[in-house]
Image (cartoon, helix red, strand yellow):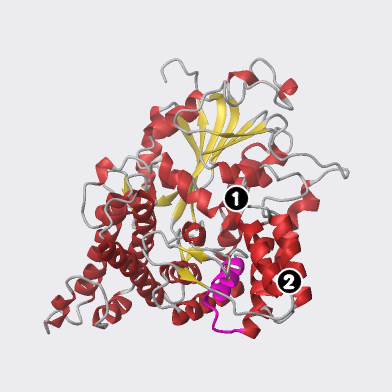
Amino acid sequence: MMKHAKKSLFLPLCSRISTFCFFLLVLTSSHCCCTVAQPSSAPSLLEKGNEAYSQGDLSTAASLYESCLDSDPNLHYCAVNLASVLTDIDDPSHLPRAEELYRSALQVDPTDADTSFNLAMLLQDKKTHEATAEAARLYGASVRAEPDRWDAWANMASALSELGDRPLDAIRSYERAVLIIERAAEESGEGENVDRDRYLSKLYYGYGVQLADLTPAACKQLADDPHSLLIGNNELDDGDNADDAAVIKRLCTEAAQNALRSAAILDATNAQASHMLAALSAEDGGDEGVHRRASPEFVAALFDDFASTFDEKLGSLEYRVPGIIGAVAAKARGEENPFASALDAGCGTGLAGRFLRPLVTGPMIGVDISQRMLEKAAKCTLKTGCGIEEEEDALSTDGKDEKLYDALVALDLEAMTLDETLLAPGLSRSNSLTEKDKEGFDLVVAADVMVYFGSLDEVVGNFAKLSRPGASLMFTCERATNEEAPLGYRLLTSGRFSHTKDYVIKVAESKKYSLSLYQEITPRMEKGVGVKGHIFHFVKSGGNEEL
Protein backbone atom coordinates (compact mmCIF):
# COMPACT_ATOMS: atom_id res chain seq x y z
CA MET A 1 0.00 0.00 0.00
CA MET A 2 1.29 3.42 -0.85
CA LYS A 3 2.18 5.64 2.05
CA HIS A 4 0.93 9.16 1.56
CA ALA A 5 1.86 10.93 4.85
CA LYS A 6 4.26 13.69 4.00
CA LYS A 7 6.75 15.46 6.21
CA SER A 8 5.80 18.81 4.69
CA LEU A 9 2.33 18.52 6.15
CA PHE A 10 3.72 19.08 9.61
CA LEU A 11 6.47 21.61 9.01
CA PRO A 12 4.84 25.04 9.00
CA LEU A 13 4.10 24.81 12.71
CA CYS A 14 7.74 24.44 13.75
CA SER A 15 10.27 27.23 13.83
CA ARG A 16 13.55 26.57 12.11
CA ILE A 17 15.21 29.39 14.09
CA SER A 18 16.93 27.96 17.10
CA THR A 19 17.13 31.19 19.08
CA PHE A 20 13.53 32.24 18.55
CA CYS A 21 10.60 31.46 20.80
CA PHE A 22 7.90 29.69 18.85
CA PHE A 23 4.41 28.32 19.46
CA LEU A 24 3.07 25.00 18.33
CA LEU A 25 -0.39 25.26 16.89
CA VAL A 26 -2.33 23.90 19.84
CA LEU A 27 0.10 24.54 22.68
CA THR A 28 -0.28 27.40 25.11
CA SER A 29 3.32 27.50 26.33
CA SER A 30 6.28 28.61 24.26
CA HIS A 31 9.57 26.88 23.71
CA CYS A 32 12.63 29.06 23.36
CA CYS A 33 16.23 28.10 22.65
CA CYS A 34 18.12 31.00 24.11
CA THR A 35 21.85 31.56 23.85
CA VAL A 36 24.21 32.39 26.68
CA ALA A 37 26.50 35.39 26.46
CA GLN A 38 29.40 34.83 24.09
CA PRO A 39 32.61 36.82 23.57
CA SER A 40 33.10 39.38 20.81
CA SER A 41 30.13 40.67 18.78
CA ALA A 42 28.70 37.27 17.91
CA PRO A 43 25.57 37.56 20.11
CA SER A 44 24.74 40.95 18.62
CA LEU A 45 25.17 39.63 15.08
CA LEU A 46 23.03 36.62 15.94
CA GLU A 47 20.27 38.83 17.31
CA LYS A 48 20.33 41.07 14.23
CA GLY A 49 20.30 38.02 11.97
CA ASN A 50 17.27 36.70 13.79
CA GLU A 51 15.49 40.01 13.35
CA ALA A 52 16.19 40.01 9.61
CA TYR A 53 15.10 36.38 9.35
CA SER A 54 11.82 37.07 11.12
CA GLN A 55 11.14 39.90 8.65
CA GLY A 56 11.77 37.60 5.68
CA ASP A 57 15.02 39.30 4.65
CA LEU A 58 16.94 36.09 3.97
CA SER A 59 19.89 37.71 2.23
CA THR A 60 20.62 40.06 5.14
CA ALA A 61 20.05 37.29 7.67
CA ALA A 62 22.50 35.00 5.86
CA SER A 63 25.14 37.73 5.77
CA LEU A 64 24.74 38.45 9.50
CA TYR A 65 24.92 34.77 10.42
CA GLU A 66 28.07 34.39 8.29
CA SER A 67 29.62 37.31 10.18
CA CYS A 68 28.52 35.71 13.45
CA LEU A 69 30.34 32.51 12.52
CA ASP A 70 33.44 34.46 11.51
CA SER A 71 33.35 36.23 14.87
CA ASP A 72 32.83 33.09 16.94
CA PRO A 73 32.96 29.72 15.10
CA ASN A 74 31.94 27.94 18.31
CA LEU A 75 28.56 29.68 18.57
CA HIS A 76 26.64 26.85 16.96
CA TYR A 77 23.33 28.72 16.91
CA CYS A 78 24.78 30.88 14.14
CA ALA A 79 25.50 27.74 12.13
CA VAL A 80 22.01 26.35 12.78
CA ASN A 81 20.22 29.53 11.75
CA LEU A 82 22.43 30.06 8.70
CA ALA A 83 21.62 26.51 7.63
CA SER A 84 17.92 27.27 8.07
CA VAL A 85 18.20 30.40 5.92
CA LEU A 86 20.01 28.46 3.20
CA THR A 87 17.29 25.83 3.32
CA ASP A 88 14.57 28.46 2.98
CA ILE A 89 16.24 30.07 -0.04
CA ASP A 90 14.80 28.52 -3.19
CA ASP A 91 18.13 27.30 -4.53
CA PRO A 92 19.08 23.60 -4.23
CA SER A 93 22.77 24.49 -4.60
CA HIS A 94 22.70 25.83 -1.01
CA LEU A 95 21.48 22.57 0.52
CA PRO A 96 24.85 20.77 0.79
CA ARG A 97 26.24 23.69 2.84
CA ALA A 98 23.09 23.74 4.98
CA GLU A 99 23.53 20.05 5.71
CA GLU A 100 27.19 20.59 6.58
CA LEU A 101 26.27 23.41 8.99
CA TYR A 102 23.60 21.35 10.74
CA ARG A 103 26.03 18.47 11.16
CA SER A 104 28.72 20.77 12.57
CA ALA A 105 26.18 22.20 15.04
CA LEU A 106 25.24 18.70 16.19
CA GLN A 107 28.89 17.96 16.84
CA VAL A 108 28.90 20.90 19.28
CA ASP A 109 25.58 19.93 20.90
CA PRO A 110 24.35 16.44 19.92
CA THR A 111 21.26 16.83 22.13
CA ASP A 112 19.86 19.96 20.44
CA ALA A 113 16.32 18.96 19.43
CA ASP A 114 15.84 21.77 16.88
CA THR A 115 19.06 21.00 15.03
CA SER A 116 18.25 17.29 14.86
CA PHE A 117 14.75 18.10 13.63
CA ASN A 118 15.89 20.56 10.95
CA LEU A 119 18.60 18.26 9.62
CA ALA A 120 16.07 15.44 9.54
CA MET A 121 13.69 17.56 7.43
CA LEU A 122 16.46 18.38 4.98
CA LEU A 123 17.44 14.72 4.68
CA GLN A 124 13.88 13.46 4.29
CA ASP A 125 13.43 15.86 1.38
CA LYS A 126 16.17 13.96 -0.46
CA LYS A 127 13.69 11.08 -0.91
CA THR A 128 16.35 8.37 -0.75
CA HIS A 129 16.19 5.33 1.51
CA GLU A 130 19.49 6.11 3.22
CA ALA A 131 18.60 9.76 3.88
CA THR A 132 15.10 8.89 5.10
CA ALA A 133 16.52 6.28 7.48
CA GLU A 134 18.90 8.86 8.95
CA ALA A 135 16.03 11.35 9.17
CA ALA A 136 14.03 8.84 11.22
CA ARG A 137 16.98 8.42 13.60
CA LEU A 138 17.30 12.20 13.97
CA TYR A 139 13.60 12.63 14.67
CA GLY A 140 14.10 9.99 17.34
CA ALA A 141 16.91 12.07 18.86
CA SER A 142 14.63 15.10 18.80
CA VAL A 143 11.81 13.37 20.70
CA ARG A 144 14.24 11.91 23.21
CA ALA A 145 15.39 15.44 23.97
CA GLU A 146 11.82 16.82 23.94
CA PRO A 147 9.31 13.97 24.41
CA ASP A 148 6.27 16.24 23.96
CA ARG A 149 7.33 17.54 20.57
CA TRP A 150 4.44 16.36 18.40
CA ASP A 151 5.90 17.64 15.14
CA ALA A 152 8.96 15.42 15.55
CA TRP A 153 6.77 12.41 16.41
CA ALA A 154 4.62 13.13 13.35
CA ASN A 155 7.56 13.50 11.01
CA MET A 156 9.19 10.39 12.40
CA ALA A 157 5.94 8.53 11.69
CA SER A 158 5.96 9.70 8.08
CA ALA A 159 9.65 8.79 7.64
CA LEU A 160 9.09 5.31 9.08
CA SER A 161 6.04 4.89 6.85
CA GLU A 162 8.14 5.76 3.81
CA LEU A 163 10.79 3.23 4.85
CA GLY A 164 8.15 0.54 5.30
CA ASP A 165 10.25 -1.82 7.41
CA ARG A 166 9.13 -0.75 10.91
CA PRO A 167 5.34 -0.40 10.73
CA LEU A 168 4.79 -0.80 14.47
CA ASP A 169 7.21 2.03 15.24
CA ALA A 170 5.44 4.19 12.66
CA ILE A 171 2.09 3.43 14.31
CA ARG A 172 3.40 4.24 17.78
CA SER A 173 4.82 7.53 16.49
CA TYR A 174 1.46 8.48 14.96
CA GLU A 175 -0.21 7.62 18.28
CA ARG A 176 2.17 9.82 20.27
CA ALA A 177 1.71 12.78 17.93
CA VAL A 178 -2.09 12.52 18.10
CA LEU A 179 -2.12 12.13 21.89
CA ILE A 180 0.12 15.14 22.45
CA ILE A 181 -2.02 17.40 20.25
CA GLU A 182 -5.34 16.23 21.67
CA ARG A 183 -4.11 16.40 25.27
CA ALA A 184 -2.82 19.95 24.78
CA ALA A 185 -6.11 21.04 23.21
CA GLU A 186 -8.08 19.53 26.10
CA GLU A 187 -5.87 21.06 28.79
CA SER A 188 -6.02 24.50 27.20
CA GLY A 189 -9.80 24.36 26.78
CA GLU A 190 -9.36 25.22 23.12
CA GLY A 191 -12.48 24.92 21.02
CA GLU A 192 -12.67 24.59 17.25
CA ASN A 193 -9.42 25.04 15.38
CA VAL A 194 -9.54 24.33 11.65
CA ASP A 195 -5.77 24.18 11.17
CA ARG A 196 -5.30 21.84 14.12
CA ASP A 197 -8.05 19.54 12.88
CA ARG A 198 -6.53 19.38 9.41
CA TYR A 199 -3.20 18.28 10.85
CA LEU A 200 -4.95 15.74 13.04
CA SER A 201 -6.81 14.48 9.98
CA LYS A 202 -3.50 13.89 8.20
CA LEU A 203 -2.16 12.05 11.23
CA TYR A 204 -5.23 9.85 11.61
CA TYR A 205 -5.05 9.08 7.89
CA GLY A 206 -1.43 7.93 8.12
CA TYR A 207 -2.24 5.96 11.27
CA GLY A 208 -5.17 4.23 9.58
CA VAL A 209 -3.19 3.31 6.48
CA GLN A 210 -0.46 1.74 8.59
CA LEU A 211 -2.97 -0.23 10.68
CA ALA A 212 -4.74 -1.53 7.59
CA ASP A 213 -1.47 -2.81 6.18
CA LEU A 214 -0.41 -4.83 9.24
CA THR A 215 -0.06 -8.59 9.05
CA PRO A 216 -1.98 -10.61 11.67
CA ALA A 217 1.30 -11.30 13.48
CA ALA A 218 2.21 -7.61 13.65
CA CYS A 219 -1.34 -6.75 14.72
CA LYS A 220 -1.11 -9.29 17.54
CA GLN A 221 2.19 -7.77 18.65
CA LEU A 222 0.61 -4.31 18.69
CA ALA A 223 -2.42 -5.57 20.61
CA ASP A 224 -0.14 -7.14 23.23
CA ASP A 225 1.54 -3.77 23.84
CA PRO A 226 -0.06 -2.28 26.99
CA HIS A 227 0.50 1.23 25.60
CA SER A 228 -1.33 0.50 22.35
CA LEU A 229 -4.39 2.58 21.51
CA LEU A 230 -6.15 -0.38 19.88
CA ILE A 231 -9.77 -0.57 20.97
CA GLY A 232 -11.09 -4.06 21.56
CA ASN A 233 -7.77 -5.79 22.17
CA ASN A 234 -9.39 -7.44 25.18
CA GLU A 235 -11.04 -9.75 22.62
CA LEU A 236 -7.67 -11.40 22.21
CA ASP A 237 -7.56 -12.32 25.90
CA ASP A 238 -10.06 -15.08 25.15
CA GLY A 239 -8.11 -18.28 24.70
CA ASP A 240 -10.25 -19.25 21.71
CA ASN A 241 -9.39 -16.03 19.87
CA ALA A 242 -5.83 -15.33 20.95
CA ASP A 243 -4.25 -17.11 17.99
CA ASP A 244 -7.06 -16.72 15.45
CA ALA A 245 -5.49 -14.78 12.55
CA ALA A 246 -8.88 -13.63 11.26
CA VAL A 247 -9.91 -12.23 14.66
CA ILE A 248 -6.55 -10.54 15.10
CA LYS A 249 -6.61 -8.99 11.63
CA ARG A 250 -10.19 -7.89 12.18
CA LEU A 251 -9.09 -5.92 15.24
CA CYS A 252 -6.60 -3.87 13.25
CA THR A 253 -8.99 -3.46 10.32
CA GLU A 254 -11.65 -2.00 12.61
CA ALA A 255 -9.07 0.28 14.23
CA ALA A 256 -7.96 1.42 10.77
CA GLN A 257 -11.57 2.15 9.80
CA ASN A 258 -12.05 4.17 12.99
CA ALA A 259 -8.88 6.16 12.31
CA LEU A 260 -9.86 6.88 8.71
CA ARG A 261 -13.37 7.81 9.83
CA SER A 262 -11.86 10.26 12.32
CA ALA A 263 -9.68 11.70 9.56
CA ALA A 264 -12.70 12.22 7.31
CA ILE A 265 -14.73 13.83 10.12
CA LEU A 266 -11.93 16.17 11.18
CA ASP A 267 -11.40 17.40 7.61
CA ALA A 268 -14.20 16.93 5.13
CA THR A 269 -11.80 17.82 2.29
CA ASN A 270 -9.50 14.87 3.06
CA ALA A 271 -10.49 12.88 -0.03
CA GLN A 272 -7.76 10.31 0.56
CA ALA A 273 -9.18 9.37 3.95
CA SER A 274 -12.72 9.07 2.57
CA HIS A 275 -11.56 6.92 -0.32
CA MET A 276 -9.46 4.57 1.79
CA LEU A 277 -12.31 4.22 4.29
CA ALA A 278 -14.58 3.22 1.41
CA ALA A 279 -11.94 0.74 0.22
CA LEU A 280 -11.69 -0.93 3.63
CA SER A 281 -15.46 -0.98 4.00
CA ALA A 282 -15.88 -2.61 0.58
CA GLU A 283 -13.32 -5.27 1.42
CA ASP A 284 -15.19 -5.82 4.66
CA GLY A 285 -18.44 -6.57 2.85
CA GLY A 286 -19.79 -3.06 2.33
CA ASP A 287 -21.82 -1.97 -0.70
CA GLU A 288 -19.27 -1.89 -3.51
CA GLY A 289 -21.86 -0.64 -5.99
CA VAL A 290 -21.78 2.89 -4.64
CA HIS A 291 -18.03 3.19 -5.28
CA ARG A 292 -18.23 4.06 -8.95
CA ARG A 293 -14.79 5.67 -9.13
CA ALA A 294 -12.11 7.27 -7.02
CA SER A 295 -12.97 10.94 -6.66
CA PRO A 296 -10.91 13.39 -8.76
CA GLU A 297 -9.91 15.04 -5.48
CA PHE A 298 -8.51 11.75 -4.16
CA VAL A 299 -6.56 11.03 -7.33
CA ALA A 300 -5.20 14.58 -7.56
CA ALA A 301 -4.12 14.59 -3.90
CA LEU A 302 -2.59 11.13 -4.21
CA PHE A 303 -0.46 11.92 -7.23
CA ASP A 304 0.40 15.48 -6.25
CA ASP A 305 1.92 13.98 -3.09
CA PHE A 306 3.55 11.17 -5.07
CA ALA A 307 4.88 13.21 -8.01
CA SER A 308 8.41 13.92 -6.77
CA THR A 309 9.25 10.25 -6.20
CA PHE A 310 6.83 8.60 -8.64
CA ASP A 311 9.35 7.22 -11.15
CA GLU A 312 11.73 5.98 -8.46
CA LYS A 313 8.99 4.24 -6.48
CA LEU A 314 7.65 2.48 -9.56
CA GLY A 315 11.17 1.39 -10.47
CA SER A 316 11.47 -0.35 -7.11
CA LEU A 317 8.18 -2.17 -7.83
CA GLU A 318 9.46 -3.48 -11.19
CA TYR A 319 6.72 -1.49 -12.91
CA ARG A 320 6.18 -2.86 -16.41
CA VAL A 321 3.02 -1.25 -17.78
CA PRO A 322 4.63 1.46 -19.96
CA GLY A 323 6.77 -1.05 -21.82
CA ILE A 324 3.92 -3.55 -22.15
CA ILE A 325 1.50 -1.00 -23.56
CA GLY A 326 4.19 0.39 -25.87
CA ALA A 327 4.81 -3.09 -27.27
CA VAL A 328 1.09 -3.64 -27.88
CA ALA A 329 0.82 -0.28 -29.64
CA ALA A 330 3.84 -1.04 -31.82
CA LYS A 331 2.43 -4.44 -32.76
CA ALA A 332 -0.97 -2.92 -33.61
CA ARG A 333 0.33 -0.79 -36.46
CA GLY A 334 4.00 -1.39 -37.14
CA GLU A 335 6.52 1.12 -38.51
CA GLU A 336 4.80 1.36 -41.89
CA ASN A 337 1.47 2.55 -40.49
CA PRO A 338 2.02 4.94 -37.55
CA PHE A 339 -0.77 6.58 -35.58
CA ALA A 340 -1.88 10.04 -36.77
CA SER A 341 -2.48 11.27 -33.20
CA ALA A 342 -2.49 9.94 -29.65
CA LEU A 343 -4.11 10.70 -26.31
CA ASP A 344 -2.13 9.54 -23.27
CA ALA A 345 -5.01 9.53 -20.79
CA GLY A 346 -3.76 9.72 -17.22
CA CYS A 347 -0.25 10.30 -18.52
CA GLY A 348 1.33 10.90 -15.11
CA THR A 349 5.02 11.74 -15.47
CA GLY A 350 5.15 10.51 -19.07
CA LEU A 351 6.46 6.98 -18.66
CA ALA A 352 4.16 5.52 -21.33
CA GLY A 353 4.66 8.54 -23.59
CA ARG A 354 8.32 7.61 -23.91
CA PHE A 355 7.27 4.39 -25.72
CA LEU A 356 4.40 5.93 -27.68
CA ARG A 357 6.12 8.94 -29.24
CA PRO A 358 8.03 6.99 -31.93
CA LEU A 359 4.73 5.45 -33.07
CA VAL A 360 2.87 8.76 -33.58
CA THR A 361 3.46 11.17 -36.47
CA GLY A 362 1.02 13.86 -35.35
CA PRO A 363 0.08 15.45 -32.02
CA MET A 364 0.48 13.44 -28.81
CA ILE A 365 -1.42 14.95 -25.92
CA GLY A 366 -1.13 14.03 -22.26
CA VAL A 367 -4.01 14.51 -19.85
CA ASP A 368 -3.87 14.02 -16.08
CA ILE A 369 -5.76 15.23 -13.03
CA SER A 370 -2.52 15.96 -11.12
CA GLN A 371 -0.85 19.25 -12.00
CA ARG A 372 2.41 18.19 -10.35
CA MET A 373 2.58 15.06 -12.47
CA LEU A 374 2.07 17.17 -15.59
CA GLU A 375 4.88 19.49 -14.50
CA LYS A 376 7.24 16.51 -14.45
CA ALA A 377 5.98 15.26 -17.81
CA ALA A 378 6.55 18.73 -19.30
CA LYS A 379 10.29 18.28 -18.75
CA CYS A 380 10.38 15.17 -20.93
CA THR A 381 12.00 15.45 -24.34
CA LEU A 382 13.02 12.93 -26.96
CA LYS A 383 16.35 12.58 -25.17
CA THR A 384 15.72 13.21 -21.48
CA GLY A 385 13.26 12.54 -18.68
CA CYS A 386 10.28 10.21 -18.30
CA GLY A 387 12.30 7.66 -16.37
CA ILE A 388 13.54 5.38 -19.15
CA GLU A 389 17.11 6.68 -19.16
CA GLU A 390 18.63 3.79 -21.07
CA GLU A 391 16.27 4.34 -24.00
CA GLU A 392 17.09 8.00 -24.58
CA ASP A 393 19.65 7.62 -27.35
CA ALA A 394 17.56 5.05 -29.18
CA LEU A 395 14.50 7.28 -29.20
CA SER A 396 16.22 10.45 -30.42
CA THR A 397 16.84 11.13 -34.10
CA ASP A 398 19.72 12.90 -35.83
CA GLY A 399 20.78 14.59 -32.60
CA LYS A 400 17.62 16.73 -32.63
CA ASP A 401 15.71 17.14 -29.39
CA GLU A 402 12.15 18.29 -28.76
CA LYS A 403 9.33 17.98 -26.26
CA LEU A 404 7.83 14.52 -25.91
CA TYR A 405 4.26 15.83 -25.70
CA ASP A 406 2.65 18.45 -27.91
CA ALA A 407 0.36 19.50 -25.06
CA LEU A 408 -0.24 18.58 -21.43
CA VAL A 409 -3.60 19.42 -19.90
CA ALA A 410 -5.15 18.98 -16.45
CA LEU A 411 -8.62 17.55 -17.13
CA ASP A 412 -11.06 14.94 -15.81
CA LEU A 413 -10.96 11.93 -18.15
CA GLU A 414 -14.73 11.53 -18.02
CA ALA A 415 -15.38 15.13 -19.06
CA MET A 416 -12.56 16.21 -21.43
CA THR A 417 -13.48 17.17 -25.00
CA LEU A 418 -11.82 17.28 -28.41
CA ASP A 419 -11.81 21.09 -28.29
CA GLU A 420 -9.70 20.91 -25.11
CA THR A 421 -7.31 18.33 -26.53
CA LEU A 422 -6.82 17.38 -30.19
CA LEU A 423 -8.51 20.49 -31.62
CA ALA A 424 -7.03 22.96 -29.13
CA PRO A 425 -5.32 25.90 -30.90
CA GLY A 426 -1.55 26.16 -31.18
CA LEU A 427 -0.66 22.47 -31.20
CA SER A 428 2.63 21.57 -32.83
CA ARG A 429 2.31 18.87 -35.49
CA SER A 430 -1.36 19.78 -35.98
CA ASN A 431 -0.60 20.78 -39.58
CA SER A 432 -0.07 17.10 -40.38
CA LEU A 433 -3.71 16.28 -39.57
CA THR A 434 -6.19 15.72 -42.38
CA GLU A 435 -9.89 16.47 -42.01
CA LYS A 436 -10.45 12.78 -41.26
CA ASP A 437 -7.71 12.90 -38.61
CA LYS A 438 -9.52 15.77 -36.92
CA GLU A 439 -12.58 13.58 -36.31
CA GLY A 440 -10.84 12.19 -33.26
CA PHE A 441 -7.73 10.57 -31.86
CA ASP A 442 -6.20 7.65 -33.72
CA LEU A 443 -4.90 6.12 -30.48
CA VAL A 444 -6.10 6.43 -26.88
CA VAL A 445 -3.99 4.87 -24.16
CA ALA A 446 -4.73 4.59 -20.44
CA ALA A 447 -1.74 2.95 -18.77
CA ASP A 448 -2.55 1.83 -15.22
CA VAL A 449 -5.37 4.39 -15.03
CA MET A 450 -8.56 2.30 -14.94
CA VAL A 451 -7.61 1.16 -11.43
CA TYR A 452 -9.05 4.48 -10.23
CA PHE A 453 -12.43 3.81 -11.82
CA GLY A 454 -14.95 1.21 -10.71
CA SER A 455 -17.61 1.59 -13.35
CA LEU A 456 -15.92 2.06 -16.72
CA ASP A 457 -19.07 3.11 -18.56
CA GLU A 458 -18.51 6.87 -18.57
CA VAL A 459 -14.74 6.92 -19.05
CA VAL A 460 -14.78 4.39 -21.92
CA GLY A 461 -17.76 6.22 -23.39
CA ASN A 462 -15.82 9.47 -23.38
CA PHE A 463 -12.79 7.79 -24.94
CA ALA A 464 -15.12 6.65 -27.74
CA LYS A 465 -16.40 10.20 -28.26
CA LEU A 466 -12.80 11.41 -28.57
CA SER A 467 -11.84 8.72 -31.10
CA ARG A 468 -12.28 8.49 -34.85
CA PRO A 469 -13.57 5.31 -36.59
CA GLY A 470 -10.87 2.65 -36.69
CA ALA A 471 -9.02 4.16 -33.71
CA SER A 472 -7.27 1.98 -31.16
CA LEU A 473 -8.03 2.03 -27.43
CA MET A 474 -5.52 0.32 -25.15
CA PHE A 475 -5.60 0.13 -21.37
CA THR A 476 -4.61 -2.03 -18.44
CA CYS A 477 -6.60 -3.10 -15.38
CA GLU A 478 -5.94 -5.11 -12.27
CA ARG A 479 -7.59 -8.50 -12.76
CA ALA A 480 -10.51 -9.92 -10.80
CA THR A 481 -12.52 -13.09 -11.30
CA ASN A 482 -16.28 -13.11 -11.73
CA GLU A 483 -16.58 -14.71 -8.29
CA GLU A 484 -14.46 -11.98 -6.67
CA ALA A 485 -16.32 -9.15 -8.40
CA PRO A 486 -19.90 -10.05 -9.34
CA LEU A 487 -20.50 -6.41 -10.34
CA GLY A 488 -17.57 -6.61 -12.73
CA TYR A 489 -15.32 -4.52 -10.50
CA ARG A 490 -14.37 -4.32 -6.85
CA LEU A 491 -12.61 -1.80 -4.65
CA LEU A 492 -9.48 -3.23 -3.03
CA THR A 493 -7.93 -2.25 0.29
CA SER A 494 -5.14 -0.60 -1.70
CA GLY A 495 -7.69 1.98 -2.83
CA ARG A 496 -7.50 0.68 -6.39
CA PHE A 497 -10.19 -1.12 -8.40
CA SER A 498 -9.86 -4.48 -10.09
CA HIS A 499 -12.03 -5.53 -13.06
CA THR A 500 -13.14 -8.76 -14.67
CA LYS A 501 -12.41 -9.55 -18.31
CA ASP A 502 -16.08 -10.10 -19.12
CA TYR A 503 -17.13 -6.76 -17.64
CA VAL A 504 -14.47 -4.76 -19.52
CA ILE A 505 -15.35 -6.33 -22.86
CA LYS A 506 -19.09 -5.80 -22.28
CA VAL A 507 -18.60 -2.09 -21.55
CA ALA A 508 -16.29 -1.58 -24.54
CA GLU A 509 -18.65 -3.36 -26.93
CA SER A 510 -21.50 -1.11 -25.78
CA LYS A 511 -19.38 1.87 -26.93
CA LYS A 512 -18.79 0.44 -30.45
CA TYR A 513 -15.43 -1.17 -29.70
CA SER A 514 -14.40 -4.67 -30.74
CA LEU A 515 -11.67 -6.63 -28.98
CA SER A 516 -8.44 -6.95 -30.97
CA LEU A 517 -6.09 -8.28 -28.29
CA TYR A 518 -6.34 -9.55 -24.71
CA GLN A 519 -3.43 -10.61 -22.54
CA GLU A 520 -2.94 -11.37 -18.86
CA ILE A 521 0.02 -9.44 -17.45
CA THR A 522 1.94 -8.70 -14.26
CA PRO A 523 1.97 -4.89 -14.09
CA ARG A 524 4.23 -4.65 -11.04
CA MET A 525 5.42 -6.45 -7.93
CA GLU A 526 3.92 -5.74 -4.51
CA LYS A 527 5.63 -7.09 -1.41
CA GLY A 528 7.51 -9.52 -3.61
CA VAL A 529 4.37 -10.92 -5.24
CA GLY A 530 3.26 -10.24 -8.80
CA VAL A 531 0.05 -8.20 -9.10
CA LYS A 532 -2.55 -9.82 -11.37
CA GLY A 533 -3.42 -7.60 -14.33
CA HIS A 534 -4.60 -7.67 -17.92
CA ILE A 535 -4.28 -5.49 -20.99
CA PHE A 536 -6.96 -4.82 -23.62
CA HIS A 537 -6.66 -3.52 -27.18
CA PHE A 538 -9.97 -2.47 -28.74
CA VAL A 539 -10.67 -1.02 -32.19
CA LYS A 540 -13.54 1.40 -32.68
CA SER A 541 -16.12 0.84 -35.40
CA GLY A 542 -18.55 3.44 -36.69
CA GLY A 543 -19.06 7.05 -35.72
CA ASN A 544 -20.15 8.83 -32.56
CA GLU A 545 -23.79 9.48 -33.44
CA GLU A 546 -25.23 7.21 -30.76
CA LEU A 547 -22.60 7.76 -28.05
For residue 236, the mark is none
Residue 40: x %, y % from top left: 74, 78
What is the C-alpha distance between the residues marked 1 and 2? 53 Å
Residue at image position (30%, 43%) is 291
Q: Is residue 126 magenta?
A: no
Q: Which residues are magenta?
A: 109-123
- Secondary structure mostly taken by the magenta-highlighted segment of the chain: helix
- Indicate the quadrant containing the N terminus: top left, top right, bottom left or bottom right: bottom left
Binning the other alpha carbons within 10 Å of mark 1 as few (below 14), some (14 to 19) or many (20 upward) gives many
Residue at image position (40%, 59%) is 25
Q: Nearer the viewer, mark 1 or mark 2?
A: 2
Residue annotated with mark 1: 322
In the figure, residue 241 lies in which quadrant? bottom left
Looking at the rendered structure, the secondary structure element under dot 1 is helix
Task: Name the residue nearer the viewer: 252 or 105.
Answer: 105
Residue annotated with mark 2: 68
Residue at image position (61%, 69%) is 123
Q: Is residue 112 left or right of residue 243?
A: right
The reply to whether discs 1 and 2 touch (Cβ–Cβ < 8 Å) is: no
Task: Name the residue nearer the viewer: 364 or 495.
Answer: 495
Task: Name the residue nearer the viewer: 56 or 442.
Answer: 56
- Image height of 329 relative to 443, above or below: below
